[in-house]
Image (cartoon, rainbow, N blue to C red):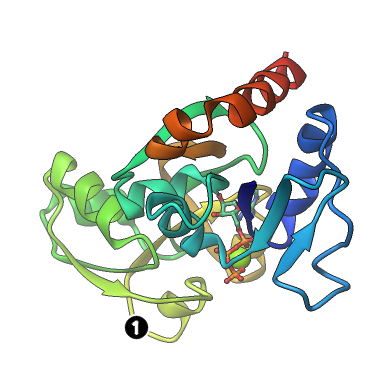
Amino acid sequence: MITIALSKGRIFEETLPLLAAAGIVPNENPEASRKLIIGTNRDDVRVVIVRATDVPTYVQYGAADLGIAGKDVLLEHGGAGLYQPLDLKIARCRMCVAAPAGFDYAAAVRRGARLKIATKYVNTAREHFAKKGVHVDLIKLYGSMELAPLAGLADAIVDLVSTGGTLRANQLVEVEEIMPISARLIVNQASLKTKRGLLKPVLEAIEGALR
Ligand code: ATP
Ligand code: MG
């Protein structure tokens, strides 16, 4: 049996065509069903539906053999025990620093100000600002980072942006790109050896579908 860990929403939607190319079709849509374990057209493949940030954990411990997770999530997790063979180029966006339109971020950085940064991505943010020599106090949030500067919790945020619509709607501007983000296929390192016969054709088919 192969278990694939997926999160609902954009990752699930954008993964369906790749799985289909590998001959794997889930029996149900997790948005409609409340089931957390979903069978597929293949008796030896099932999908488990987990929170996006939990995908690397399921694969790391072998509760899932495969998973699909954003690079943002993988960087925060650290990637221990995971083999990351493929950039699936789906769920694309960028991680960036954003600040209120009236805040001169560049000037604050130049004069060496200590900045309050709210983010869900504290590890990635810490590394980014350390590399740039910017002093920051990081404030961990679990959602709606855009609110933090508006409510006076932080000077700026580190968040994912695709169209920029949410930033604009909240009078925030992107002041620095940290890195481009896309979803990656992750594989449990032990499964790769013990289930090679089952996994290899699936990995090859997904790779083929990307080309
Ligand atoms: P939740 O929304 O349930 O709090 P989440 O934000 O972790 O959880 P999603 O919003 O489904 O889950 O995001 C899943 C992944 O999709 C993210 O980890 C990221 O890689 C990618 N992603 C997030 N926001 C965007 C976006 N605006 N455009 C494209 N991809 C995105
Ligand atoms: Mg989200």
Indicate whether 208 appears above or below 131: above
Q: Give coordinates of residue 183: x percent, y percent.
A: 57, 40
- Residue at the (34%, 54%) spot, across then down: 77
Indicate whether 154 appears above or below 86: below
Q: Give coordinates of residue 80: x percent, y percent.
A: 28, 45
Say whether residue 156 is left or right of residue 100.
left
Residue 124 in view here: yes
In terms of depth relative to the viewer, which is nearer, 33 or 178? Answer: 33
Residue 96 in view here: no
Indicate whether 25 appears above or below 49: above
- Residue at the (77%, 74%) spot, across then down: 35
Quadrant location, ligand no. 1 = bottom right
- Residue at the (82%, 43%) spot, across then down: 42
Say whether residue 79 is left or right of residue 145.
left
Give the residue type that dot 1 points to.
Leu
Residue behind mark 1: 153
Q: Quadrant of residue 31?
A: bottom right
- Residue at the (46%, 51%) spot, across then down: 59
